[in-house]
Amino acid sequence: MALMDFIKKQFIDIIQWTEDSDGTLAWRFPMRDMEIQNGGQLVVRESQMAVFVNEGKVADVFGPGTHKLTTQTLPVLTYLKNWDKLFESPFKSDVYFFSTRQQIDQKWGTPQPITIRDKDFGAVRLRAFGNYAFRIEDPKLFHTEISGTREVYTVADVEGQLRGLVLQNISTAIAASGIPFLDLASNQIEFAKALSTQLAPEMAKLGLKIEGMTVQSVSLPEELQKILDQKIGMGMVGNDMGKFMQYQTAQAIPKFAEGGGGGGSGIAGDAMGLGAGVALGQVLAQNLQAGLQGNNQAAVQAAASAAAAQAAATLKPDDILATLEKLGDLKAKGILSEEEFAAKKAELLKKLV
């Protein structure tokens, strides 16, 4: 009876895998009740590797090429070795194919802002996204750690784990790169390299190799985006303190104008409302150090008064006319009332006399 069972068995002559779609990482050859013919062939293509598993343990790994299977190369694969046991072999082998080509355009991103540490700003939050590519480098490790005995294992089955690894290593990668937070957006290539370097050993633990990483966007929080905008503006004036104060004053003029040039700003606010930002910036640059060191409100007020006085004294006819035009624009936009505009206009025209 055992001999008849042996004769009825189907023997496999060729073991191979032709991928019929993208995204498959591991595929188990359908053995069923069939056994591998002694002298059969294993065909492994350039983008593949094959693993033989016997009694739950990896017996051998085959790279690309055509391999002849015999009882000498893999004696546990067939019944033909076991004549003394009436062809009843205690061995059961499975064959798994693994795709080793690159799995490209894998997306990653931060579903919620993540907190990182920065040497300039302390704890900050950011959003980022991009893509990456990977491949199976160690099929034996991938089989024992990830895919196991499943008939098919796909990219979709592992992408959640890989995306989590990316997010988990972003903070460490930024710290290791040494790139200041405000420069991340303009150094995306360096950021991607640092992230790829950080991920490499984590992927290797799964039998995978990262082949490429891109950072397509880094979104800054609104408050830090404003700081970045200021930094870009300051790039035009360099490190000159006087020019810095002029720049800051110019940024503040619309805010003071919205309040009518008065309110809590006092004389300094009136001066800025009159468009004397340049002179004010120069005087504030000269007096800022003394005012801050003494932390004296009177000293600060005195500096502001001096700024206003010098601003009024240094106004030229062209400056006054330019200021009148700006005030006219503010009135047209409804920021200044007719009465406020008339008062400012009269004050400026007196200086032309």
Image: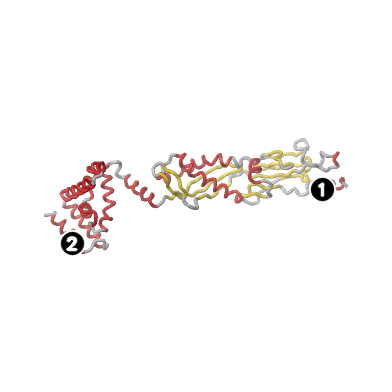
Relative to 187, is 283 on the left or the right? left
Q: Residues within 10 Å of mark 1 (few under 14, many from 20)?
A: few
Give the image location of residue 269, x and y in percent.
Answer: 23, 53
Which residue is at the far top?
Answer: 72
Relative to 163, is 90 on the left or the right? right
Residue 345 drawn above or below residue 201: below
Task: Name the residue rendered at 32%, 45% in the picture.
Answer: 234
Relative to 309, is 15 on the left or the right? right
Residue 342 is marked as: 2
Relative to 239, is 47 on the left or the right? right
Give the image location of residue 247, x and y in percent.
Answer: 28, 48
Task: Name the residue rendered at 22%, 58% in the picture.
Answer: 327
Q: CA distance from mark 2 to mark 1?
A: 107 Å
Q: Say how the picture is coloured.
A: secondary structure
Give the image location of residue 109, x and y in percent.
Answer: 50, 50
Query: Quarter-wise, where is residue 37 in the image?
Result: top right
Query: Quarter-wise, where is residue 97 in the image?
Result: top right
| Badge 1 element | loop
Q: What amino acid is at disc 1?
A: Lys
Task: Name the residue rendered at 43%, 41% in the picture.
Answer: 179
Judging by the rendered image, the residue that carries numbered circle 1 is 9
